Amino acid sequence: MSELIEQVEQQFDAVPTKEEPTRSLALVQADTARFELAQREAKLLGASSLVPKQYQGNVADVVVAMNMASRMNADPLMVMQSLHIIHGKPGWSAQFLIATFNACGRFSTIRYEFSEKKDACTAVTTELATGAEIRGPEVSLEMAKAEGWSTKAGSKWKTMAELMLRYRAAAFLIRTTAPEIGLGLYTTDELKDVNDAS
C-alpha cells in the first residue's frame, strides 16, 4: 500500500503546477522581446554606410553577425568588417582571427618561428593557466606548392610568402588549440586557396 501511495505522489509531483506555464510564457515573451530588439538593432546597423555592402539593408545577415559577435564577446561592426563570404562559405580575415586569439586572455600573444631558410613557419603560444608551450603545425612553402596554394594565378604566396606563412601558421595553431575562438570557421585566405586550387 505504501508503494502505491509513493507512486501516486511521484505522478502528482510530475504534473506541472500553475506557476510553470506562467514561467514558460515569461521566457517566451522575453525571447520574443530580445528577438525584436535584435531586429531593430540590425535594421539600424544595416542602414549605416560604415558596414560592408553585403550587410547594408540586410537585416538577416546583420542579426547573424550580431549573434556571432555576442558569442565571441566582440564588437558587431568588427565582426561584419572581418567576416567575408568566399565561394558561399563564411571566413574570417586572418588579422581578425589572430587578434581575437591574442586578446582572449587564455594564451600569450602568438609568436612565429621560422626555419633557417625562412621557407617554413611555426606559430607558438603559451597557455597562461599552465605555462605550457603550444606549437601549431609547421607550414612551409613546399606545403603551399604541394597543396596548390602558391601555383594559382594571382596567389599572394608568390609575392608575400612570409606574411602568408605567418597567417596560415597562426590559423592552424588557433584551429588545433582553441577552435571555439573562431567559431570553427576558416580564414578567407584558406577558403580562397582550397576552392581556387581544386
Image (cartoon, rainbow, N blue to C red):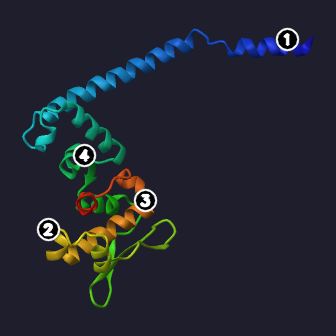
Dot in front, 4 or 1: 4
Residue at x 32%, y 60% (from the top left corner): 103
The N terminus, quarter of image = top right
Q: Is residue 101 above or below residue 34?
A: below
Left-right relation of 85 to 10: left
Q: Are marks 4 and 3 in contact (CB under 8 Å)?
A: no
Q: Which mark is residue 178?
A: 3
* Circle 1: residue type: Ile
Q: Quadrant of residue 144?
A: bottom left
In primary-sequence order, the first of circles 2 and 1 is 1
Q: Which one is nearer the viewer's eye here, 114 or 12? A: 114
The residue at 35%/54% (across/down) is 182
Regarding mark 2 in the picture, which secondary structure is present there?
loop
Q: On the image, numbered disc 1 is attached to which residue?
A: 5
Tell me the distance, in whole angstroms, between the alpha carbons under discs 2 and 1.
Answer: 79 Å
- The disc, 4 or 1, on the residue closer to the chain's N-terminal end is 1
Name the outermost residue toward the right. Answer: 1
Q: Which residue is mark 2?
A: 153
Disc 2 residue type (three-letter): Ala
Of tags 2 and 1, which is closer to the observer? 2
Can residue 175 be seen here? The reply is yes
Relative to residue 77, is residue 94 depicted above or below? below
Q: Nearer the viewer, mark 1 or mark 3?
A: 3
State the residue position of label 4. 88
The crowd level at tag 2 (other Cα within 10 Å; few <14, some 14-19, many 20+) is few
Q: Secondary structure at mark 4?
A: loop
